[in-house]
Every structure is written in structure tokens, then in C-alpha cells.
Image (cartoon, helix red, strand yellow):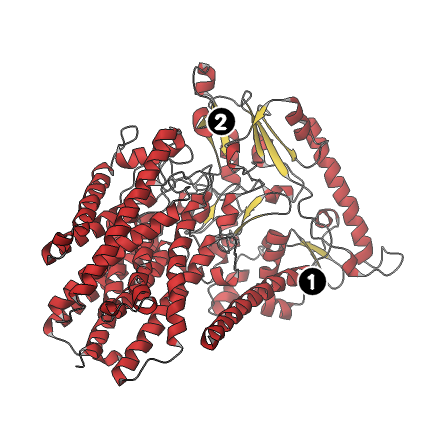
Amino acid sequence: MNQDRRDFIRKAGIGALAGIGAAAGLIPLFALEKTDLSVFSDKPVPGKTRWGMLVDTRKCGEGCTECIVRCHHDHNVPDFGKSKSEVKWIWKSGYEQAFPTASKQFQSSDLAHRKVLTLCNHCAEPPCTRACPTEATFRRWDGIVSMDYHRCIGCRFCMAACPYGSRSFNWQDPRPALKTLSPAYPTRERGVVEKCNFCSERLAKGQLPACVESCPEKALSFGDLNDPKSEIRMMLASNETMQRKPELGTLPSVFYII
Amino acid sequence: MIEKALKGSRGYWAWVALLLVLIGLGISAYARQMSLGLGVTGMGRDISWGVYIAQFTFLVGVAASAVMVVLPYYLHNQKAFSKIVIVGEFLAVSAALMCMLFILADMGKPQRVLNVLLYPSPHSMVFWDVMVLNGYLFINLISGWAVLGAERKGVPPAPWTRPLIYLSIPWAFSIHTVTAFLFAGLPSRHLWLTAVLAPRFLASAFAAGTALLILITFILKRVAAFDAGQEARSKLAVLSAYAGTANFFFLGTEFFTAFYSNVPAHKQSLQYLFFGLEGHAPFVPWMWLSVITGLVSVGVLMAPSLRRQSNWLIAACTGLVLSIWIDKGVGLVIGGFVPSPLEEIVDYMPTATELSVTLGIWAIGLLVLTVLLKTAIAVKTQE
Amino acid sequence: MSKFLRTAVAFFIAIAVFAGTWLFMQSGHGTAAAAHAAVPAAAARVVPVDSTRCIAQTEWMRAHHMQLLNQWRHDSVREGNRTHVTRDGRMFDKSLNTCLGCHASNPMFCFMCHQYANVKPTCWNCHISPMESNK
């Protein structure tokens, strides 16, 4: 975990250096000579980074809901209980529900009862973005499958297309179902689809996702899957891991150690 | 020409008034849905489409089936269809209109519907569906209206109507193919993830659509003294019978692939619909009703001695429409969501609000059809 | 035959116009966004933000803040371009929270003017307004 943090600090540092460099170009006082503004682009290079997560289900505490509570609080996810209007970004599923095509015969009772943390897989080949008629959901430059709540028309094609049940629709106004409001993040409106955003608002500030940070067992790792030296890639190389429904070719960015 | 729809008998106005009442009911239910959200329907997190999308699917088929009179009349010069062709075209117009209204009713943010055109996304099947459905509505409305207008003046139709009519033939196939692709391209929804879905959609559409057209000619004969002709009806009945046979053949192949291969994911939705899955069996009687009435109706339509008798023909057509309405307008869409991606079985029951909106949209479609057919018949009978 | 040809040509032209319009719209989106490119996202964090003055003159902001917010939203959500550079070289994070960082000190800041102008923007359906967060 420490390694991961170091990774982050290093990346933020590089970003900062780049920023100062760019600032020198933009603010005439810092610059030795005049620079053309168009040389600098804030637009990130698409496909350079691919954020991913590794869930160690062995460490995940039974009955612990720290990450879920923290995520749903920070992102103003309404609590409708387990009803048909339920909205969830991250939740726990049974092993057989999360991995329906995995072997089920004669498994250990530990495995049969294990709870698996499930969330949006931020697939590299997402079926949901393909189905969306307005590009309200789209795959970002850093591999995050993002939602543009301003553009969503609420047709729920993405929900039918998602093979993981990771998307929730706002069947009614979510505001009354929020006990406390986190002012830093907006709520949603009735009639749009929402889901986990891999904490893109925290990544922009150089912080780890809320679920990763809040896990008391340090069962979640987060990092760049495109960087062969990142901690998550090291862990993927040294552990046997699983993805959900790999047979569908969606290439999930969330991995599991069972 | 439309002024001809303003002159009618007492029965005509009573029918229009009934439809207006139903439309009012639908609008008030829709207002409730708009203010409270789609939570007032029976849909939910797991079954995220319901009656609206199911009705849409069924009606795209009805719209597409106009080709079954347009194609023989214009390409094969089948004079028997001369009186019925306009009925088919106007039925397509009203069905396409209902389709779009059902899509609109199903949307969480209908006020943003133009985003589909503002941000055109050719990778999305919805984009193509919006294109082809709108195109189909206008092709049929414009060509049908123009041909009718020419007939009223006693002149041959304008030369541009013919290419437009020819265009409507492949276009009819395209609307239902694209509609099937809405479903058939989604991974992990195994009831829909099948290459035979598009052919099956076309077969069931041509079966139910032509059967509906036959029923409409009977109604018109009775209430408007407008007879499209016995020959047209019996020809349509044969088309309907073969299309129905193809539909059940395709359904049979679905069963074979699912149950012979024995792959659980392929079987589950069919099990849920036809036999029940883990104690959940809300659709079982309906699906079997659909299969049995459908097969019997196709049998009746196949027998020349039976389909020549009006009573048998009416019964068989009603049975076939009902059968395919259950199969496509209920089972296919809802069954596709069971089990959910997390292997949960959730049952769906439409609410009164949802059904009122549905009824309202049907009433709008019937009103449009009534007005169009009233005009057409007034022109044809030289009133 | 000529009739058929004419029809075919008309159909082809219709498809070409459709494809052309679509490509034009798509390319339009691309260039509009590229024109607003500036500096890496990290810059907003490290460069001290000058909050003594607004990003633009009051008159301009009054007239154009909605377009600016729309553009900011597009840039930061869809392009990842999060840093706004003012004419005089100051940098700001493209976020409604940047605005609220100063303007929320008066919870009625947005409301008074919107009420006066009788406009009903839908921002606060989702974003937490200063009236709510200052409670």
C-alpha cells in the first residue's frame, strides 16, 4: 500500500513539475523568453493511463461496510434500501453472484459464503458506452467509464447493456433519500443513470479513491494498469487473479484475488 | 382532404370521444409520471424496461408489416390489394407514431430527446432506430397521402411517389431489423443475444401485422361499409399463415439451441418464461397461451376451407395477434431481464399509472388511424 | 431506366449529405475543444490561485457566466482539461466549486440575480447550492 502511495506522490510530482514548466511559459514573469501558448496542452493523452483496481477478497472483512458507507456518503448516493429503486455504486455480492460462470461444484464452504466487493468494472471495451445514443456515458482518456449527467436522456440502454448490474437509474428524486449532503460533490436528478466514477474528482487532486483509502484491511489496491512498474501490475503478476465474466470480452479493469 | 374526417355518423363521433377520454386518462397518468419519476411504474433496478419498450417492439412489427401489401401491389401488380394498400400504409403511420410515443414515455429525461440528434452516435443502435422510424413514418404518410390526393382529383399520382414507395419496401425491413439489433447486440442478455432475433422479429411482425390488417378490413366493412375485398383478405391470410409458421419455427430453434446445448445462461430466460425458474413463474400460463393460440391460429389460416369462412378467419387472426402480442409485447422484453446480471430473479408487475399511459398512447395511435382511414374511405367511396 | 437512375442519384445524394453533415458536426466538436487547451491539470493545484479578483470582469461574467460554466463542464468532464488561464495569466480549476469558493460567502449571490431576471436555471437540482451547504 505504501508503495502505491509513493507511486501517487511521484506521479503528482511529475504533474507539478510539468505544471510549473507550463506556468513559466504562460506567466511572462517566469519565462525567459516569449512562448506560444498553443504549445502547451492541458488535454491529457488518451489511452496513456488506464486506472484499475485489485480487490483482495481474502482480506475483505466480513460484515465490514466502511468503503461502501464512505463512497455513498462522499458521492451523495441516495439510500432507498433494497427496493426496486435502489441506487448503488459499490456493494457486496455473493461469490456465485459475482462470478456466475465460475466453477460451483464441490467448492469450500468458505468460498460459497464469501462476499465479493462489486462496482463498475471500467471496462476497456465497455458495452454500455457503445449502447449510449448521446455519448452521455463514455470512456475517458484515463480508462474511466464516465457519466455526463447533463447529457443523459434516461433511456437506460446502458443498464440493459451492462453485464455486471453496475448501473442504477434515478427512479425518483434522490434528494429526500439523502441523510447528509456532501457539498463537494453534486447529487443527481430524477431520470438519469449513475454509477461508480472511480473517484475521478479525487484523482484530479492526486488522491486515491475513497473506497481504497477507507478500507481498514487495505484490501484494495489502485493504480495504472498501463504502467508495467506500478504496484497493481506487480501484484497482478505475482497473484492469481480473476475478472468478472471475462468470456464477454469487456476487459474489466477491476481484478479480484480469491 | 383532412376535412373529410370532420363529417361522420353518430357512431364515429362516439368512437372519437371514447378515444379522447382514454387519451386524457393517459395524459394525466403521464403527468404523474413526469412529476414523480419513472418510479411510479413497475420497472426497477433489475427489470429496467417494461410495458413501454415491449409495446414499442410489438408496434414496430405492425408498422413494418405494411410492406406485406405494398410489395405485392407495387412490385407484383397484385390488383387485389388496390383497396387495402392505403389501409396498410396508414396503419404503418399510426404504429410508427405510437412507437415513438412509447420511447418518449420510457425516457427519464424526455426534454432532452434532441440530444440523440445533437450528438449523433452511429455506434448506438438507438440512433439508427430513431432515424429509420422517423423516416418510415414520413415516407408512408407522404406517399399514402399523395396517392390518395391524386385519386381524389382523378389524376395519376405524381411521378415522385413511386420511388418513395419503392424506398419504403427495404425501409420496412430495416426498421424491424434495427429494432432487433437494439436487443441482439447486448452481451449477457442471453434471451436476446441470438442471431435469429432479427429474422424472428420480421416473421412475427408479418404474421401479426397482416392478421391485424385483416381484422381492420372486417371492422371497416362493418362500420364504414368499405370492403377491401375477399380476395385481398384470403391472400393476406396465406401470407400471415406462412409468416406465423416461420415465427414458430424460429422459436423452436431457440428452444433446441438452449436446451440441447444445456448451457445454463442460454436456458434460464426460456425456463423463466415457459416453465418457471426457482419458483418464479408469473409468465408461464401466458406464454403457453401464446404458443397454443398461435399454433392453432396458424393451422386454421393454413386450411383453405376454414380461412374462407369469415368467422374462422376473424378468430384465427385475433388468436395470432394475441399470441404474438403476448410473446413480443410482454415476454420477450421482460424475460430478457431475468435472471439479472447478478443472478437474481425479480418479478415485474406494471402499475396502474404505467397501464394508463400505455392505453393513452394506444388511443392516440387509434385516433390517428381513425382520422386517416376516415379520410381515405371518404375519398375512395366518393362521398 | 433514366427514372431509376434519377432515383438512385437522389438517394445517393441524400446519404452523402447526411454523412457530410454528420462528419461536419463531429469535426466541429473536436476543433472547438482543442482551441481551449491550456496547461496540465496539476498546474491548478501547485500554482497559488489568485482569488482576490474574479476570473473576468463583472460585466462580462454577468452576461456570459452560463456559457463559461458550460464550456468548463465540457472541458473538465469530457476532455480532462481542467485549468482555466485568464488573460492576465492567473490559473483556476475549471469547477463550479472554484466559483463557489468565493461567491458562496454570500449565499444569496446566485439567487438574487436569478430571481430578479426571472430565470430558473436547473443547476441546484444536483449541485449543492450555497443556501444548502451553509446551513
Left or right: A56 in relation to B203: right
Residue A161 x, y percent position in the rendering: 45, 44
Determine if residue B356 is in view. Answer: no
Q: Are tags 2 and 1 found on a single chain?
A: no
Dot 2 amino acid type: Val
In the image: residue B109, left or right of residue B249: right
| Residue at x-position 46% and y-position 46% | A158
Q: Which mark is residue A116?
A: 2
Q: Residue B172 at x, y = what percent?
A: 37, 61
Which amino acid lies under the numbered mark 1 shown in the image of this protein?
A: Ala
**Contact (CB < 8 A) between labels 2 and 1?**
no
Residue at 45% in and 16% down: A107
Element class at badge 1: loop
Q: Which mark is residue B29?
A: none
> How much space separates mark 2 and mark 1, taking CA atoms?
45 Å
The mark total stands at: 2
> Is residue A99 visible from the viewing direction of this image?
yes
Q: Chain of mark 1?
A: C
Task: Give whichever of B373, A190 is nearer the camera.
Answer: B373
Task: Characterize the local packing of mark 1: few (<14), some (14-19) or many (20 or more) Cα atoms within 10 angstroms.
Answer: few
Tell me which chain the residue with mark 2 is part of. Answer: A
Left or right position of A137 against B79:
right
**Residue that mark 1 sits on:** C35
Q: Quadrant of the C terminus of chain A?
A: top right
Residue A182 higher or lower than C111, as above or below: above
Quadrant occupied by the N terminus of chain A: top right
Q: Nearer the viewer, residue B148 or A152?
A: B148
